[in-house]
Image (tube, rainbow, N blue to C red):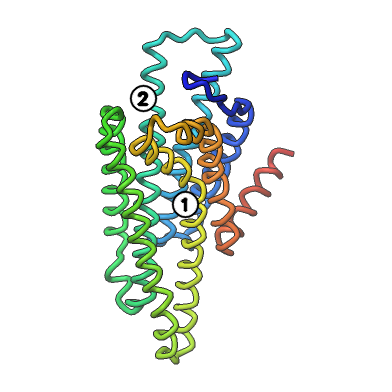
Amino acid sequence: MNTTGIAQIMIPQELFLMLGLISLVENILVAVAIIKNRNLHSPMYYFICCLAVSDMLVSVSNVVETLFMLLTEHGLLLVTAKMLQHLDNVIDIMICSSVVSSLSFLCTIAADRYITIFYALRYHSIMTTQRAVAIIAVVWLTSITSSSFFIVYHTDNAVIACLVTFFGLTLVFTAVLYLHMFILAHVHSRRIMALHKSRRQATSMKGAITLTILLGVFVICWGPFFLHLILILTCPTNPYCKCYFSHFNLFLILIICNSLIDPLIYAYRSQELRKTLKEMIFCSWFFAM
């Protein structure tokens, strides 16, 4: 029971640890596969690699926090209240950086797919490797800086409101972009008669569909957490809201599941990435024999 008298849903720490470790391994494999395969060295896959790193932040924070809790509960580690506070702040910054960077990279990939489809002939001059690297640097710098600011002032409702607003704006931006993309793509495809250009657009649309799936999974997995933040702002003392707050551990499980599901989507939707992952796994298994 918590201070409100509502029973909290208890989830075994071992489950958090297991999901976190699986997610961490999956995302490391995706990042290494993209780095290893030169055929995947393109702006879109650079952004996907960064998305995997964002998921890794959630996995690492979950594994570290769960290990500390398990070791403390079994008397194997003595931690002071100050150390716990510092650890909690670091973990919160990692999780906040993950959500901000994930949303930013989802928007970036959406813009990249939009340029690929509607500005195919100018794509390589618009989205150069240098610009992609600059975008990645700006996103990470902004994510870490804003997350640190959010954690320092986490008790201020204005900070929570900013985070929720950012979540809403990025979803609206991506949704509008995709709506425009899918509506005009059909009309645009009729004007392209050359076979090689049709194939180029088909590949671009496949990438757009992949990101649509990623965005949908992100909303499903992170949506309950952001609804939690909205209710904190709008009805923190309402009994129904307090009942919703008691499910917070389930929201955390969903967030971890997002990090676990994303690599499966990458592998399923990309034949080249799937091939590289298979080679890496089989080679690791062969040398372990």
Residue 69 position, x and y percent, is 53, 18
Which quadrant is home to the C terminus?
top right
Q: What residue is drawn where x is 47% and y is 73%? A: 205
In whole angstroms, how far apart are the C-alphas of marks 1 and 2?
A: 25 Å
Residue 156 position, x and y percent, is 26, 30
Mark identifier at residue 219: 1
Q: Nearer the viewer, residue 60 or 39?
A: 60
- Figure quadrant of residue 10: top right
Q: What residue is drawn where x is 50% and y is 70%? A: 206
Residue 114 position, x and y percent, is 36, 70
Residue 279 position, x and y percent, is 63, 53
Instruction: Say which residue label 2 marks.
Output: 89
In the picture as drawn, the residue positioned furthest to the right comes out as 289
The earlier-in-sequence mark between 1 and 2 is: 2
Which quadrant is home to the N terminus?
top right
Mark identifier at residue 103: none
The crowding category of the residue bearing disc 1, from other C-alpha atoms within 10 Å (few below 14, some 14 to 19, many at least 20), is some
Q: What residue is drawn where x is 51% and y is 46%? A: 221
Q: What residue is drawn where x is 56% and y is 63%? A: 269
In the picture as drawn, the residue positioned furthest to the front comes out as 239
The crowding category of the residue bearing disc 2, from other C-alpha atoms within 10 Å (few below 14, some 14 to 19, many at least 20), is some
